[in-house]
Amino acid sequence: MGRRAVDALIMSVASRHHMVVTHRQLTESGVARHEVRSRRGGLLTPVSPGVYVVGDLTPSACLHAALAALPGSAVSHRSAGVRQQLRVLAPTDHHELVVVRGHRSRRRMPGVRVRSTMWLPDEDVTVVDGMRVTTVARTICDLGAVVPRRRLGHMVEVAIAEGRVTAGEVQACAAAWCRRGRAGSGMLRALDHELLDTEPLAASELERRAARLLRRAGITGWTAQYRPPWYDGLRGVVDLAWPAERVVVELDGRRWHATTQAQADDRRRDRLATAHGWVTLRFGWQEVVHRPGAVTEECRAVLAARRPGTEV
């Protein structure tokens, strides 16, 4: 086989693998070992033992070469976030990140930053555009170690609202991921409390705690499970209300308060209350349990404003 024919064969094989070929693929296609050796540093750019890029070392070629060189690896961290279309993440230039499963690799490869892990189960990996990529939930967990807390929180909110991941998927992955000493575990636990509202008990328990909180603070005159006369039957009762002052308290005991329909219903209820001259206060588990003083002070202030000259 002439040189041009061999080059054409190599290009043909590489074109089926994103311009990345392994030594085994070439020899199985009929390219002799000495032909492979003679093209190293020329047509074949070695990026790892037995793995070559054909042509320019583009970021995409480098990434595919890394995936070929590290069996069981997957695109991760910022690179996975960009491929999973997670917002507030800037596209990476030429450094793609790969998580290696099963062993800690210190191997260096051009254009790729290799992050090692001892834990990458199959359920944490998906395929995007023919490439192994960590799932959205696992990507969020990985980013907990490298992305500022506020940005990560916003990214999770948007991802759930857009339907790219569910709160349950994030919580399940974080529960398995978080370990003492593992980078990002503390941030993920804080994020779970702040955004995913990990209420350990039923919503009825939240209502009981809120009622007990108000009684201990000396705030009385409210009615539980009150049905405003102007409600039209859509979730037709409110959790707590002061009918005389026309003040409503809604207690959100759900784990995640960001489904499109739930938000639309809540906004509709609030608009309806406002149209009839009522004020709606909304409190979640974190506020009632961990910031009770703020809850009672807000209730006092609103009730005082609705009853001029009267102390609550």
Image (spheres, rainbow, N blue to C red):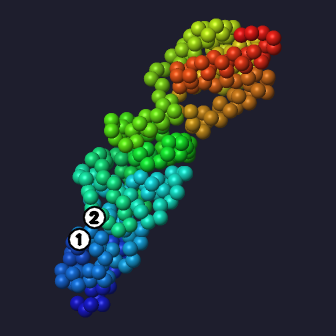
Q: Is residue 147 left or right of residue 43?
A: right
- Which of the pair 29/23 is nearer the observer? 23
Q: Image quadrant of residue 115?
A: bottom left
Can the viewer see residue 31? no
Q: Is residue 166 left or right of residue 22?
A: right
Q: Is residue 227 left or right of residue 88?
A: right
Of the image marks 1 and 2, the number of the one nearer the N terminus: 1
Read off the residue under disc 1.
Answer: 50
Residue type, label 1: Gly
The relative height of residue 265 versus residue 292 in the rendered view (above or below) is below
Label 2 crowding class (10 Å Cα cut-off): few <14, some 14-19, many 20+? many
* Dot 1 and dot 2 residues touching (CB under 8 Å): yes
Residue 245 coordinates in the image, percent (x, y): 76, 14
Residue type, label 2: Ala
The residues tagged by marks 1 and 2 sit, at their Cα atoms, a distance apart of 8 Å
Residue 226 coordinates in the image, percent (x, y): 67, 14
